[in-house]
Image: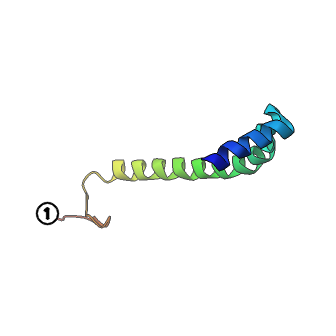
Amino acid sequence: MPGLVEAASTVYRCRGVRGYFSGVTARMLGQSPATAISWTVYEFFKFAITNYTQHHDDDDVCATGAVVSFVD
């Protein structure tokens, strides 16, 4: 912990409070597209899985995820 306190003190001494936030803009510009892609893929698969399970109510899903149809 002494390293963290020393680093925080050095940043404050050299750059002030603004020093803690330097690079935030660059980080946000780099992280935003990755976050948007991740959420888009997540929402797509959530929709696809929900839609798939609603249309296959008569089928049973095995523990492995395979769909098995029962014929009477």
Please, what secondary structure does the residue beneath circle 1 have? loop
Query: Label 1: which residue?
Result: 72
Quadrant of the image occupied by residue 9: top right
In percent of the image, x 73 and y 46: which residue is there?
7
Which residue corresponds to the image point at 71% horizontal and 45% vertical from the top-left? 6
Q: Is residue 21 above or below residue 67?
A: above
Location of the C terminus by quadrant is: bottom left
Judge whether residue 32 can be spotted in this image. Answer: yes
- Residue at 79% across / 32% down in the picture? 17
Above-or-below relation of 72 to 36: below
Q: Residues within 10 Å of mark 1 (few under 14, many from 20)?
A: few
Q: Is residue 56 left or right of residue 19?
A: left
Q: Is residue 23 above or below residue 12?
A: below
Front residue of 33/57: it is 33
**Place of residue 57 in the rendered image (x, y in percent of width and height, measured from the top left):** 28, 51
Dot 1 amino acid type: Asp
